[in-house]
Amino acid sequence: MTQTNDTPREPAKVFFADLRARAANKNRTAKLKKLFEAVGCENIVAKGDLTAVKLHFGERGCDTHISPTHARAVVERIKALGGRPFVTDTNTLYSGSRHNAVDHIATAVEHGFDYAVLGAPVVIADGLDSTNVIEVEIAGKHFTRVKIAGDIVRADSLVVLSHFKGHELAGFGGAVKNLAMGCAPRAGKQDQHCVRFAVDAKKCIGCGECVAVCPVGAATMADRKAAIDKSSCIGCGECLTVCPKKAMSIDWHTEIVPFMERMVEYACGAVAGKAGKVAYFNFLTNVTPDCDCVPWSDAPIVPDIGFLASTDPVALDKACCDLVNEQAACPDCKLEHGLPSGEDKFTALWKWTRGDMTFVHGEAMGLGTPRYELVKVG
């Protein structure tokens, strides 16, 4: 059964710092430290806590991920509270530069995430080959048990740093997706990604990009056309991402809402047992059309906005969506014809996605509320 709340939650506080700075005490690091205090991390991180700092190191070739300098600012505040932070992510379902812990850490170091910069160790939370897994009980519509990376579960407290940006399946990626996909081992990612792709032969140009990236050999070529073996497809979505003609697709009308619901339920599993021990920071900078999982960085779709923090991931993501949609689209970005202030940027980017289900199912599951009060921090 799905967890439900008959009485709507009070609006959650979401703290916001813009990026204006004309003095050292107003620079971005200083703003992050003020957000850390505003969100009440002194009540979240206790002395001696093993504190997981969950972020995304970026796929090799992506350079718009969160800055290691900003991660260090959070690490320093955790240490000042007596916490013992480690910076962490989980291995990917798809093939790439973060598929196992060895390649993952090498990629992290290439992107500046090492002890010398962070002041904390990098730990891949699901282990060398994504088998460090703990099953967590939840009361969901799709799951009663979910698979979460062992070192996320074992951590005493959790600080989630998310680069807020677009995503071709989810519409956007923020705090909830960082919990759901980001805290799951490969088996958990596959649970969420149980959609199956098909090829539109009329669009397929036979380039073979899908074959090159498929981690299980489900994509093949015959007579200069791609084909997907649905019995072996694991639904990772890499073929969708790399196909230059968008010949790959799912049945959006039937599969996208359950996909979003499964993500929300996994997010609930990632924070199970950590009531009052989780803080979330979203970075509204370099708001790219795609996830940091792709090996490139497209031009941002809106100007940089700022940093936000909350103890409610649903409210935080909703505030970020609203702030993005208040902006006019940048020129020369993937929103080719531009969009004025007030228009939904992520639906315009990825037409069939249902990012709104993050808020609907997130509230139904008790993960958070889409109602928020935006509080400006200096």
Image (cartoon, grey):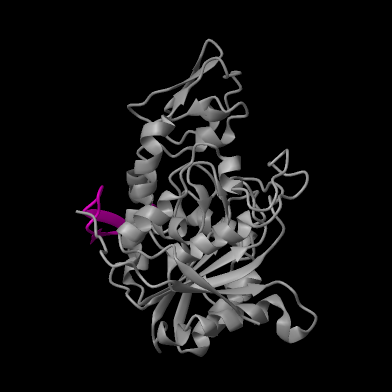
- Rendered residue at 68%/53% (across/down): 341
In magenta stretch: residue 142: yes
Residue 221 pos. (x, y %): 50, 18
On the question of residue 262 being in view, the answer is: yes
Looking at the rendered structure, the number of numbered marks drawn on it comes to 0
**Left or right of 16: which side holds 154?**
left
Vertical position of residue 96 compared to residue 227: above or below: below
Which portion, as a residue range, is magenta?
128-147
Residue 275 pos. (x, y %): 32, 75
Which quadrant is home to the C terminus?
bottom right
Viewer-nearest residue: 76 or 14: 14
**Which residue extends farthest right?**
22
In magenta stretch: residue 248: no
**Left or right of 364: which side holds 168?**
right
Q: Main secondary structure of the magenta part?
A: loop
Residue 150 pos. (x, y %): 33, 63
Vertical position of residue 154 compared to residue 298: above or below: below
On the question of residue 121 being in view, the answer is: no
- Rendered residue at 44%/39% (across/down): 236
**Left or right of 63: which side holds 3?**
left
Residue 376 pos. (x, y %): 61, 77
Viewer-nearest residue: 36 or 355: 355
Quadrant for residue 228, please give it.
top left
Viewer-nearest residue: 352 or 92: 352
